[in-house]
Amino acid sequence: MSLSVGRWAVALVCLLPFAYGSIRRDWRAYWKHRGAVVGSSVVGIAAYNSVLYFGLRTTTASNALLLNSLAPLLIVVLGALLYRQRLQWHQGLGLFLSSVGVVNLVLQGRWSQWHAISFVPGDAIILGAAILWAVYTIWLRQLPSHLDRAGLMTIQIATALVVMLPFLLAEHRLDPGPDWELSAYAAVAYVGVFSSALAYFFYMRAVEHFGPARAGLCIHLAPMFGVVLSALFLHEKLQPYHAAGMSAIGAGLILSSVNWNGLEKPRWLSTSAET
């Protein structure tokens, strides 16, 4: 909770100077749509990160990466169940390819070792976090498009901080808390600026522009970036399975993003009625 509150406090300080004018202009609209604003704040900002951090204490990074990669599939399922959103054939194929790429990275190319993956109670928590992210993504699309996204996000962060405050106080009563050295402050500042303020803002705009299904697929880019950054900063050697996994992820994202409306659907994907 200290990390969750710290990152969003930093993000709030970063966004507020740019969002103050739009907040003053749109405050009546925030109140009108207060259910969606508060709901998305609690689910996507207050709960998602806190639940994810809690789950990471009792599971492995590989398991967390694998389970969190289910978020794009969950977004598609929830969109179909709740809002009857249809998935085009190329989006479904792209989702499948990118998922295969993620699994290949997690298994390090050893598909025969699938049975060796062991699941622990923390994995259920990570899966819960993935569900929260899917709900948040679907909910973003329901927020009015005329609202300035920087202002909306600032209101969401402020709401989430109020919700998280009692949990932070409870945590400090049960645990002495983190050791606040310079490196810890630097980590919170990085997460607050880049992984919170900028990343969430860009994701919100992506959902608004591309829709939940296509924007959600970008989650599969995270393991790709992890591989590249590990090679650059930790000097880890790239292996053939890295190339295969990243190629599958890239192909899946490209396939799902291209406008195929003017192209004929493959015959094997056509229904009998269409045929």
Image (cartoon, grey):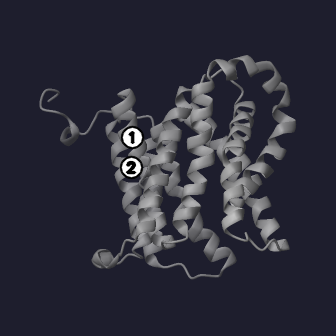
The Cα atoms of the two marked residues, 1 and 2, are separated by 10 Å
Judging depth in this view, the residue of 228 and 215 nearest the camera is 215
The residue that appears at 68% across and 21% down in the rendered structure is 31
Q: Where is residue 208 in the image (x, y as percent from the top left)?
A: 58, 31
Residue linked to disc 2: 95
The x, y position of residue 241, in whole percent, is 43, 74
**Viewer-nearest of discs 1 and 2:** 1
Quadrant where the image shows the C terminus:
top left
Q: Is residue 91 left or right of residue 38?
A: left
- The type of residue carrying mark 2 is Leu
158 and 23: which is toward the camera: 158
Q: Residue at x 47, y 60 (%)?
A: 126
Which quarter shows the N terminus? bottom right
Q: Can residue 109 be seen in this view?
A: yes
Task: Please name the amino acid that badge 1 sits on.
Answer: Val
Q: Tell me which residue sits at (55%, 42%) in the image.
A: 43
According to the picture, the residue beneath numbered tag 1 turns out to be: 76
Q: Which residue lies furthest to the right in this view?
A: 17
Earlier sequence position, callout 1 versus callout 2: 1
Between residue 249 and residue 181, name the one nearer to us: 181
265 vs 273, nearest the viewer: 273
- Please give left or right for residue 202 compared with residue 183 in the image: left
Compared to residue 58, the image places residue 51 above or below, namely above
Tell me residue 178's x, y (percent).
74, 71
Q: In this view, does 126 lie to the left or right of 170?
A: left
Task: Determine the residue located farthest toward the left in the rendered image.
Answer: 272
Residue count near mark 2 (Cα–Cα under 10 Å), binned few <14, some 14–19, many ≥20: many
Instruction: Please state the horizontal and vertical placement of residue 164, each as a whole percent of the image.
Output: 67, 48
Q: Element at badge 1?
A: helix
Tag 1 and tag 2, C-beta contact below 8 Å: yes
